[in-house]
Image (spheres, grey):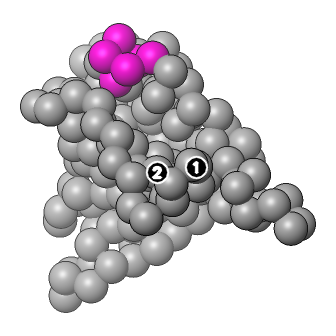
Amino acid sequence: MVMWHEVVQSAPEFAARVRALFDARKHKTMATIRRDGSPRISGMEMQFDDERITFGMMDGSMKALDVRRDPRVAFHSPSVDPPEGEQSGWVGEAKLSGRAVSRLDEEGGYEEGSYEIDIDEVALTYLGEGGLIIESWHPDVGHQRRIRT
């Protein structure tokens, strides 16, 4: 399982910027996969700690049923507009994707409605010199940075 601390150890400055964007506001957006294969978008709260990223869902909710069928999830940070008249002042947006994994309680049983993310990808996009900057982190590749003009 790939946990948040691996991103932090591999690319600490990148991880700090990603976390700051997710922590900017309480509510994030989460995508799950419906039974028919189409996406479902839901408002969500999630928490970072030094080791992992966790979130909860009410048992029996549609998104919880989605995750039981197919654990793939994606999260998007809260959107922040650029300062008026200063597009280059846009702080950007962060995204992460992976699989929802049920968390264990202290007795070793599954904690109902409590999950953590097995990370596949973390991404950060923002405006910088030369155009749109896209930074990403993957377990097998590490941190990368690209510019789209």
Q: Quadrant of the C terminus?
A: bottom left
Span of residues in magenta: 7-12
Q: Position of residue 135 (x, y in %)?
A: 39, 43
Q: Quadrant of residue 116?
A: top left
- Mark 2: which secondary structure? strand
For label 1, the residue is 128
Q: Nearer the viewer, residue 121 or 39?
A: 121
137 vs 123, left or right, is left
Identify the amino acid type marked 1: Gly
> Which numbered circle lies on residue 68?
none
Disc 1 packing (10 Å; few <14; some 14–19; many ≥20): some
Q: Is residue 17 visible?
A: yes
Q: Residues within 10 Å of mark 2 (few under 14, many from 20)?
A: some
Q: Residue furthest left?
A: 140
Residue at position x 56%, y 49% in the image:
129
Q: Position of residue 23 (x, y in %)?
A: 66, 38
Does 91 appear in magenta? no
Indicate the amino acid at tag 2: Ile
The location of residue 77, given as percent across then percent down, is 57, 53
Residue furthest toward the front? Answer: 130
Q: Secondary structure at mark 1?
A: strand
Q: Secondary structure of the magenta portion, mostly?
A: helix
Q: Residue at x 38, y 20 (%)?
A: 11
In the rendered view of the protein, which quadrant contains the N terminus? Answer: top left
Q: Which residue appears at 27% of the width and 44% of the height? A: 121
Q: Are marks 2 and 1 in contact (CB under 8 Å)?
A: yes
On screen, residue 26 above or below 8: below
Question: Dot 2 corresponds to which residue?
Answer: 133
Q: Is the residue 98 above or below the residue 50 in the image?
A: below
Visible residue check, residue 110: no
